[in-house]
Image (cartoon, coloured by chain):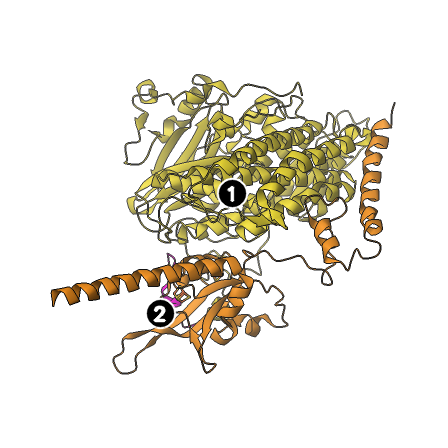
Chain colours: A orange, B yellow
């Protein structure tokens, strides 16, 4: 019968229509307030619409999500900031759009480079959020952030981030990247244990030879 | 599903004919440069040789045409990759010509699919193709100075020939590149060019080509004028900035001229400044709906150069990601085809609903929903996360590929396939016969909907596709409706592949990267052509290395771009309202078309 195809198709529309209201009944008014309801709605078994009422509702940000990078500092005992970055320059070299600028510190007396950056800029308009800087930094000193709400009123002055603006404590990294952080710490501990063992072995050898 | 062929394309193992130089002793030599393959052909014999390989040796499909600037030898080289549609590896032909007067005969008469690609090579490299019917710039505008892919051409914001740039470290003297260029000097014009006096001749040419008026014959007919209409550059049906100059006789299309390049950023020049690794995230931005499969093609090309091995588990993950991408893309293509036909957004939103879950998975695995930057040379960036959405990732995947996606595809099928309006808008519209589909070098769903069962995954298998059980979808009418149906078929096949991957994935352990994590990738001087069956068609990367840290040549065979070659032909004789449907059924993305 002519028109049957359309009617069948409208059946699918009706199904979608009903599915989008099932949640309202199932969660009795809590649809937009209960986190559990939200997760079911967003999950692989969710039947209704996936729409997220941003900014009231937010999706969980997965750990590997990458946005503009940040620099890590350790918090010293007196609250001072110790940069992890050694200004080795690898991130600046690997960065595809070349949006990282690093000024290396030189010892004022000898003129030799010191492993700490004097200045560090990222032009976040150019950054393509590729994540290479974090991936290839050998010192875990730069990581990708989760904070994507960075709109501002002036691109010429506000979008060039300097070291102050880029720096965040290690604890923040541990909080947003729990798995990665644990793995890094484990690797570091293993490394140190290895070194200590080597040292102990060397000391023992030295002792024996005495 | 009678339209599906069950058997893989047989001739996949046929080696390229190795006697071409014997056939044409004075016109053809083997390319003996180390790391190179194929044949060098004398320019004056090119058309003859091309006709012979097409008619006598079965290389009926010219996949890619591009040029390379061997500046140090004072030569330009045009590189052709031809294939048999029955399957098998490439036959590469190369023609050399002096750099300062680069002329090569055009192959448009033998392979009409060379049309846009030759125009591109003229535009970007300054190689003239003698006998080309319409040798105009295609991506740049006519007032543009120089040919940007020539090695001695420099852009207005030029810093250095190769990244990394020296100013970034250890000096760190930060500046924005705009500051180097006081207002007005960031554009280059040809030496004898005046902006104020410029008359856009190229535009005239477009309209002249479009509007050649036909006399109405005996004078008894009603006198009508032809009407030239610009569809685009800002037009919702073009899915981006793309223009079609249509000349109409009443409502019927007489001539259609695609105009593109509005989104051109000279991806290839950027790519030649970049290091090998730095190109990976740029490939995401080609066909931005399919970043995973773009990554795959590029990784394959560089792995060919490096002779790198990819661990088993990484291969499986790659295939999973790429096939999920195909499903996303086809959902998107179908949804927006319906938009173009006038069914605003309900079908599109139903179609891209499932895409949400897939993008969530990409985000959790690769770190980004669309700009995945996921593959590395010799593997992938990270393994799949163990947990995803409050459960095990593998459970999520099982539910997704075994239950959810098949159901969604069936839903879409019920929803649209038998809809009488869609049928009457699509059946018999924009018919592309198989011989034309091959001649015009169309690829992907467009080619297969015309009855040519050519799929790179089967015809010239790469990665681990020969381990999976799937059919090459094919439809025979070559109209808009078949190009819609074939996308449903292909999604079903992709789901099949995904099901096999998900079944096997838990049993496959091991690394996801071979070798050490390296940011300075070096490869021996050689060439490689890596190609994959992208959702939109064959995506090829032609990469030439000179042994340094940056590719000497980095070319992309973009399926969206080459599929457009046939658009004018397809639209001829149809009503103007069908143009949007026909364009939608080709499924282009301007990020890739314009590069
Ligand atoms: S952030 Fe890392 S890679 Fe970049 S300079 Fe500092 S230590 Fe080197
Ligand atoms: S994320 Fe990529 S583009 Fe951005 S600073 Fe890091 S390396 Fe550069």
- Does residue A91 appear to the left or right of B196 in the view shown? left
* Residue at point 44%, 42% (across, down): B299
Magenta residues?
A: B161-176
Is residue A66 in view? Answer: yes
Q: Which of these two is toward me, B570 or B17?
A: B17
* Residue at point 61%, 33% (across, down): B495
In the displayed structure, B472 sits above or below B388; it is above
Q: Which of these two is toward me, A69 or A28?
A: A28
Q: Which of these two is toward me, B493 or B131?
A: B493
Q: How crowded is the residue under tag 1: few (<14 C-alpha within 10 Å), some, or many (20+)?
A: many
* Residue at point 59%, 65% (across, down): A147
In the displayed structure, B255 sits above or below B451; it is below
- Say yes or no: labels 1 and 2 on the same chain: yes
The span from disc 1 to disc 2 (Cα, nearest Å) is 34 Å
Q: Position of residue B233 (x, y in %)?
A: 66, 49
Q: Position of residue A132 (x, y in %)?
A: 45, 57
Q: Main secondary structure of the magenta part?
A: loop
**Mark 2 and mark 1 in contact (Cβ < 8 Å)?**
no
Residue A114 magenta-highlighted: no
- Judging from the image, mark 1 belongs to the subunit labelled B
Q: Which of the 4 quarters of the picture holds residue B432?
A: top right
Query: Which residue was labeled with disc 1?
Result: B294
In the displayed structure, B523 sits above or below A133; it is above
Q: Which of the 4 quarters of the picture holds residue B27?
A: top left
Q: Which mark, by number, is residue B170?
A: 2
């Amino acid at each position: 019968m002519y028109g049957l195809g359309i009617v069948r198709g409208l059946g699918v529309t009706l199904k979608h229509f009903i599915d989008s209201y099932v949640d309202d009944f199932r969660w009795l008014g809590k649809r937009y307030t209960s986190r559990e309801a939200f997760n079911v709605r967003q999950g692989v078994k969710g039947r209704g619409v996936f729409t997220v009422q941003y900014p009231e509702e937010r999706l969980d940000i997965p750990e590997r999500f990458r946005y503009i990078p940040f620099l890590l500092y350790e918090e010293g005992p007196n609250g001072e900031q110790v940069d992890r970055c050694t200004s080795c320059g690898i991130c600046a070299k690997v960065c595809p759009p070349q949006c990282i600028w690093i000024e290396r510190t030189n010892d004022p007396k000898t003129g030799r480079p010191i492993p700490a950056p004097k200045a560090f800029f990222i032009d976040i308009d150019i950054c393509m959020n590729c994540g290479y800087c974090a991936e290839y930094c050998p010192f875990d000193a730069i990581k990708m952030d989760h904070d994507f709400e960075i709109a501002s009123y002036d691109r010429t002055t506000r979008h060039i981030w300097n070291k102050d603006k880029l720096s965040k404590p290690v604890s923040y990294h541990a909080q947003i990247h729990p798995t990665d952080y644990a793995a890094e710490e484990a690797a570091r501990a293993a490394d140190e244990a290895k070194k200590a063992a080597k040292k102990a072995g060397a000391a023992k050898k030295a002792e024996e030879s005495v | 599903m009678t339209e599906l062929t069950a058997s893989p394309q047989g001739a996949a193992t046929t080696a390229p004919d190795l006697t071409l130089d014997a056939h044409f002793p004075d016109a053809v030599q083997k390319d003996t440069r180390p790391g190179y393959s194929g044949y060098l052909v004398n320019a004056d014999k090119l058309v003859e040789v091309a006709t012979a390989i097409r008619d006598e040796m079965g290389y009926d499909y010219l996949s890619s045409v591009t040029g390379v600037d061997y500046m140090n030898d004072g030569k330009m080289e045009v590189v052709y990759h031809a294939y048999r549609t029955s399957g098998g590896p490439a036959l590469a032909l190369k023609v050399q010509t002096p750099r300062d007067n680069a002329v090569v005969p055009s192959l448009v008469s033998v392979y009409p699919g060379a049309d846009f690609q030759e125009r591109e090579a003229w535009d970007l490299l300054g190689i003239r193709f003698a006998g080309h019917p319409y040798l105009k710039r295609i991506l740049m505008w006519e007032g543009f100075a120089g040919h940007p892919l020539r090695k001695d051409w420099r852009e207005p914001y030029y810093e250095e020939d190769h990244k990394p740039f020296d100013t970034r470290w250890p000096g760190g003297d930060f500046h924005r590149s705009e500051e180097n260029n006081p207002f007005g000097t960031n554009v280059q014009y040809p030496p004898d060019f005046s902006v104020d006096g410029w008359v856009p001749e190229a535009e005239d040419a477009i309209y002249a080509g479009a509007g050649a008026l036909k006399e109405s014959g005996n004078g008894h007919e009603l006198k009508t004028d032809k009407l030239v209409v610009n569809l685009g550059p800002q037009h919702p049906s073009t899915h981006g900035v793309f223009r079609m100059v249509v000349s109409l006789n009443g409502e019927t299309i007489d001539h259609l001229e695609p105009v593109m390049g509005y989104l051109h950023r000279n991806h290839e020049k950027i790519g030649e400044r970049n290091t090998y690794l730095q190109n990976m995230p740029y490939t995401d931005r080609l066909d931005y709906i399919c970043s995973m499969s773009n990554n795959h093609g590029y990784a394959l090309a560089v792995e060919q150069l490096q002779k790198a091995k990819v661990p088993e588990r990484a291969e499986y993950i790659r295939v999973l990601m790429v096939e999920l991408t195909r499903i996303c893309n086809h959902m998107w293509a179908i949804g927006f085809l319906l938009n173009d036909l006038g069914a605003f957004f309900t079908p599109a939103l139903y179609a891209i609903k499932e895409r949400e879950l897939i993008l969530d998975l990409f985000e959790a695995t690769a770190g980004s929903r669309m700009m995945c930057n996921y593959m590395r040379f010799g593997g992938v960036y990270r393994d799949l996360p163990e947990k995803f959405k409050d459960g095990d990732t593998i459970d999520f995947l099982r539910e997704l590929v075994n239950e959810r996606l098949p159901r969604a595809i069936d839903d879409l099928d019920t929803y649209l396939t038998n809809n009488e309006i869609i049928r009457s808008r699509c059946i018999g519209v924009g018919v592309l016969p198989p011989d034309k589909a091959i001649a015009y070098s169309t690829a992907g769903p467009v080619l297969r909907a015309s009855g040519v069962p050519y799929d790179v995954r089967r015809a010239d298998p790469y990665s681990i596709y020969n381990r999976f059980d799937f059919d090459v979808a094919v439809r025979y009418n070559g109209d808009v409706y078949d190009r819609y149906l074939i996308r449903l078929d292909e999604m079903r096949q992709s789901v099949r592949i995904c099901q096999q991957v998900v079944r096997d994935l838990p049993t496959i352990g091991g690394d996801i990267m071979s070798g050490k994590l390296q940011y300075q990738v070096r490869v021996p001087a050689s060439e490689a052509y890596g190609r994959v069956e992208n959702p939109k068609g064959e995506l090829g990367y032609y990469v030439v290395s000179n042994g340094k840290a940056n590719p000497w040549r980095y070319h992309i065979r973009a399926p969206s771009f080459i599929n457009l070659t046939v658009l004018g032909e397809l639209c001829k004789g149809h009503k103007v309202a069908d143009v949007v449907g026909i364009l939608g059924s080709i499924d282009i993305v301007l990020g890739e078309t314009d590069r």
